[in-house]
């Protein structure tokens, strides 16, 4: 089956930000494939829709939400720690929809603590779900973009690169920054290979966004809700990115608020505040380091390990 509208695969779409991205993509005419580990029988969900930040929200309930809004959605279970599961997810998404136009990777594992207080198993989990899961998903998706004539977008939920981000959460930062490195590196690949209709970019929240994690903190201190924004700011920013020219967004590591301000001209973000009349504290820097160097275009001698006889990969 091939659908006429554009097709988006959202990985990590069971709740919170991922759910909102999927719903808003559907509202804007996309056929949406939803990938996540948690599944359920959506027909038995009560109340419906469930709390979007609770474990009752799964890809199945999100798909039902979209369908009841008149949209097209398909739930697919996936374990992003398993490459075979990832390949099957991509295969099913394309079999159902006939194409792939947009890939959004929102799946993530989190543990914020010092190196001493981060067990190796936590570190490995974050590497598997965050950086390795992204790499495996992107690599599995590229052949489908190639079949589509290299016309597509990839959006990664990962931060701009700066040193303060490493503080107090080194293991987590290692996995998330690696995701941003993939964004920068693949963007360069697209440029070198003259795939002008492909773009990959990363996006991160400028302020804390309401989620399952923030609900635990606001349950202890209701005042903290004043510093939260609704996840709609994130989905609105992603929609704006998908509508922007590839030359504008390819390789960008940006923030939701900053992109909406610079690209759409938005200046009033009050509609996104969880508590009316409050102005959430920005948790990200105002400016970020420039990662480019004076010799940016000097590649020296290109090396391709595939052509080296010594390579055992």
Image: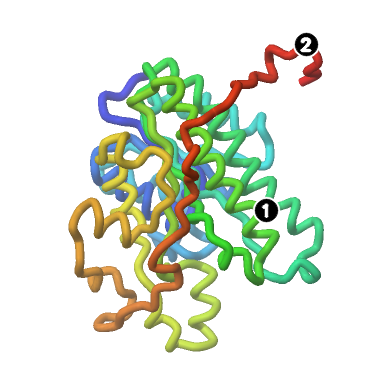
In which quadrant of the rendered view does residue 181 lie? top right
Residue drawn at x 47%, y 40% is 75
Which of the two residues, 17 or 286, is positioned nearer the viewer here? Answer: 286
Q: Quadrant of the N terminus?
A: top left
Which of the two residues, 11 or 196, is positioned nearer the viewer here? Answer: 196
Residue identifier under label 2: 309
- Where residue 15 sits in the image (x, y, percent)? 47, 57
Q: Earlier in the sequence, mark 2 or mark 1?
A: 1
Which of the two residues, 240 or 73, is positioned nearer the viewer here? Answer: 240
- Where residue 148 sits in the image (x, y, percent)? 38, 18
Q: Are marks 2 and 1 in contact (CB under 8 Å)?
A: no
Q: Secondary structure at mark 1?
A: helix
In which quadrant of the rendered view does residue 32 lie? top left
- Where residue 247 sits in the image (x, y, percent)? 31, 35
User: 99 left or right of 296?
Assistant: left
Which of the two residues, 291 or 96, is positioned nearer the viewer here? Answer: 291
Residue drawn at x 43%, y 57% is 17
- Where residue 157 sits in the image (x, y, percent)? 48, 51
Q: Quadrant of the C terminus?
A: top right
Residue identifier under label 1: 126
Colouring scheme, one of rainbow, by chain, secondary structure, one colour: rainbow
Residue drawn at x 27%, y 56% is 260
Other residues around mark 2 within 10 Å, as few (<14) / some (14–19) / many (≥20): few
Residue 41 appears in the rendering: no
In which quadrant of the rendered view does residue 137 lie? top right
**On screen, 37 above or below 52?**
above
Q: Secondary structure at mark 2?
A: loop
Residue drawn at x 74%, y 58% is 122
Other residues around mark 1 within 10 Å, as few (<14) / some (14–19) / many (≥20): many
Q: CA distance from mark 2 to mark 1?
A: 34 Å
């Amino acid at each position: 089956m091939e659908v006429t509208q554009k097709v988006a695969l959202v990985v990590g779409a069971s709740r919170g930000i991922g759910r909102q991205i999927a719903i808003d993509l559907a509202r804007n005419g996309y056929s949406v494939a939803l990938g996540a580990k948690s599944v359920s029988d959506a027909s038995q969900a009560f109340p419906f829709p469930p709390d979007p930040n609770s474990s009752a929200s799964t890809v199945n309930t999100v798909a039902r939400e979209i369908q009841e809004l008149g949209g097209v959605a398909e739930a697919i279970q996936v374990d992003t720690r398993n490459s075979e599961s990832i390949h099957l997810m991509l295969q099913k998404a394309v079999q159902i929809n006939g194409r792939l136009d947009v890939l959004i990777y929102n799946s993530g594992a989190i543990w914020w603590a010092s190196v001493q207080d981060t067990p190796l198993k936590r570190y490995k989990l974050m590497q598997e779900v965050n950086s390795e899961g992204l790499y495996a998903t992107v690599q599995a998706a590229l052949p489908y973009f190639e079949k589509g004539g290299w016309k597509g977008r990839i959006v990664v939920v990962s931060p701009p690169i700066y040193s303060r981000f490493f503080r107090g959460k080194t293991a987590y930062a290692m996995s998330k920054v690696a995701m941003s490195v993939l964004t920068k590196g693949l963007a360069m690949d697209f440029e070198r290979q003259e795939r002008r209709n492909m773009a990959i970019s990363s996006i991160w929240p400028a302020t804390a966004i309401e989620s399952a994690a923030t609900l635990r903190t606001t349950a202890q201190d209701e005042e903290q809700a004043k510093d939260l924004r609704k996840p709609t700011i994130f989905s609105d920013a992603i929609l704006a990115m998908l509508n922007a020219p590839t030359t504008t967004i390819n390789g960008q590591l940006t923030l939701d608020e900053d992109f909406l301000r610079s690209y759409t001209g938005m200046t009033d973000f009050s509609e996104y505040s969880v508590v009316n009349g409050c102005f959430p504290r920005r948790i990200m820097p105002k400016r970020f380091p420039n990662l480019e160097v004076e010799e940016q275009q000097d590649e020296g001698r290109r090396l391709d390990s595939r052509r080296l006889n010594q390579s055992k990969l």
